[in-house]
């Protein structure tokens, strides 16, 4: 039986003081809030009608689980998930995140004078996070600047695990990749033509290489218009792949296309990036190797500093943890065809990870599914309804950092197919999205009013940032050297 202490602990609504709405879309709404227990600024995302489509609910389940299992300073964190009032009937979930100020896409776009120290520190954090993710046997599968959050202290956090997968040796690759629709501009060449029957973590390493190159120039490296054009742009830089690499390709159509391609010589990266640090280009050359077997792993870059001296003086193995591979039992649900009630029960079980007393009752088998749990959600429903009512299209919000993509868990629902028209369409058409993106974006800390460059632009119920992310990295108090000091 649940005691008085339980009811006191689960007066959850009083823990969070809702401030204002910072995002709205088809997925639901996001509000900024203060955790009254800690004083910390958080974002609370209401994801509505979670179980309308089983496939979308399954993606949400997968991401909630991965973000719980991948606890790392360079990965976005779920702080809490509100307990639903009824185990068998809940439809919406409320997820509490840490706040972030911008994302790497906006930082790169707004700053044409990022320093080599910024480039180095940004890449170091990304590879440090990737080492942790990959040693857990997880593929992110959708790394791009928009899926990397940024703060004014130059800290980055990877988010949007909506397409991520845990890999197991006996997982059939045909199943593992059927819904793979990651953004083409950052897609590894082996994914452009389904070259191989089994993929490796090298697909994420390629994406990191593309992101790093974009930091150096301020522009996407391979903005392909379609898959064929994407391969052409890649080989224009890397040169035609070797006969050995082509021979390893199992897709006959892709193999014929590459064999018929005119022979191209690789362009020296020093010519493509004339102002870049030679050590940075040496590493970039490896990250962008056409053949996945020639790309280093994040762990190799961490361990063998003599081979990768770009991070000399910055890398510190004590700050670069690995993780044991995730247990296959965590993802048993991937092996069965789920119905709506199955997914609801699995998501409920994940929510209980943030409610230890309820979890104990559940594991002991004494949890009554008909019991109406003490929940703050009813109070939150009223507060969110009030916020939504005053968030009509075109209305100016008081939030200095609204974003068009204020969702991170579900995005727009789409039909899955690989060949669409542009990187922007790739982004819009990704199925259910991720828990982490602009839902966790906060107003900049103590920025002058002049820093807020952009007014609100409302499109499809969401909004673009009102401030330029340039202020994040061009403050006199935020030097690259001070950013680097945070790693030691």
Image (cartoon, helix red, strand yellow):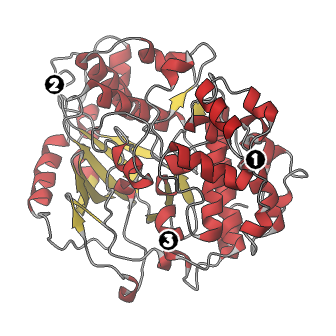
Pointer 2: what residue? 89
Give the alpha-carbon distance from disc 2 to disc 1, as whole Å.
61 Å
Pointer 1: what residue? 263
Q: Is residue 462 above or below residue 114?
A: above
Q: Earlier in the sequence, mark 3 or mark 2?
A: 2
Q: Nearer the viewer, residue 105 or 378?
A: 105
Q: Position of residue 460 (x, y in %)?
A: 20, 57
Q: Quadrant of residue 322?
A: top right
Q: Residue at x 71, y 71 (%)?
A: 117
Q: Quadrant of residue 484?
A: bottom right
Q: Nearer the viewer, residue 425 or 91?
A: 425
Label 3 CA crowd tier, 10 Å (few <14, some 14–19, many 20+) = some
State left or right for residue 121 relative to residue 433: right
Query: Quarter holding the N terminus?
Result: top left
Q: Position of residue 102 (x, y in %)?
A: 44, 65
Q: Residue at x 36, y 48 (%)?
A: 408
Residue sticking out furthest to the bottom: 450
Pointer 3: what residue? 109
Q: Residue at x 29, y 60 (%)?
A: 32
Q: Earlier in the sequence, mark 2 or mark 1?
A: 2
Q: Nearer the viewer, residue 50 or 352?
A: 50
Q: Is residue 104 above or below residue 180?
A: below
């Amino acid at each position: 039986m649940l005691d008085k202490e339980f009811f006191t602990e689960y007066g959850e609504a009083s823990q969070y003081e809702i401030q204002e709405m910072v995002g709205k879309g088809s997925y639901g709404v996001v509000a900024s809030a203060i955790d009254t227990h800690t004083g910390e600024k958080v974002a609370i995302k209401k994801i509505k009608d979670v179980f309308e489509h089983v496939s979308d609910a399954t993606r949400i389940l997968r991401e909630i689980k991965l973000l719980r299992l991948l606890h790392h300073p360079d990965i976005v964190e779920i702080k809490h998930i509100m307990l639903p009032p009824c185990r068998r009937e809940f439809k919406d979930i409320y997820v509490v995140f840490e706040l972030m100020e911008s994302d790497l896409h906006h930082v790169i776009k707004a700053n044409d004078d990022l320093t080599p120290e910024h480039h180095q520190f940004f890449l170091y954090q990304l590879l440090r996070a990737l080492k942790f993710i990959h040693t857990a046997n997880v593929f992110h599968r959708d790394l791009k600047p928009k899926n990397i959050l940024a703060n004014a202290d130059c800290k980055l956090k990877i988010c949007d695990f909506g397409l991520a997968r845990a890999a197991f040796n006996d997982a059939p690759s045909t199943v593992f990749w059927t819904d793979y629709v990651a953004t083409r501009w950052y897609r590894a060449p082996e994914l452009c033509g389904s070259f191989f029957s089994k993929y490796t973590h090298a697909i994420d390493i390629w994406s990191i290489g593309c992101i790093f190159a974009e930091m150096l120039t301020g522009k996407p490296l391979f903005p392909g218009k379609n898959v064929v054009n994407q391969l052409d742009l890649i080989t224009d830089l890397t040169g035609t792949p070797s006969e050995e690499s082509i021979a390893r390709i199992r897709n006959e159509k892709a193999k014929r296309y590459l064999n018929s391609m005119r022979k191209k010589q690789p362009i020296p990266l020093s010519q493509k990036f004339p102002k870049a640090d030679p050590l940075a280009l040496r590493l970039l050359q490896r990250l962008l190797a056409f053949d996945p077997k020639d790309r280093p792993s994040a762990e190799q870059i961490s361990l063998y500093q003599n081979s990768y001296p770009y991070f000399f003086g910055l890398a510190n193995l004590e700050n670069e943890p690995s993780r044991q591979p995730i247990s296959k039992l965590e993802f048993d649900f991937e092996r069965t065809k789920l119905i709506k009630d199955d997914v609801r029960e699995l998501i409920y079980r994940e929510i209980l990870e943030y409610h230890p007393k309820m979890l104990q009752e559940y594991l002991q088998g004494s949890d009554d599914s008909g019991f109406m749990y003490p929940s703050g959600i009813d109070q939150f429903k009223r507060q969110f309804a009030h916020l939504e009512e005053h968030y009509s299209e075109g209305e100016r919000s008081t939030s200095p950092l609204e974003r068009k993509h204020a969702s991170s868990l579900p995005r727009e629902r789409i039909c899955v197919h690989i060949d669409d028209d542009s990187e922007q369409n790739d982004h819009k058409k990704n199925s259910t999205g991720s828990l982490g993106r602009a839902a966790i974006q906060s107003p900049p800390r103590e920025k002058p009013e002049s820093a807020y460059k952009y007014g609100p632009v409302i499109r499809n119920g969401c909004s673009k940032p009102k401030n330029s992310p340039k202020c994040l990295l061009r403050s006199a108090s935020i030097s690259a050297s001070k950013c680097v000091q945070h790693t030691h």
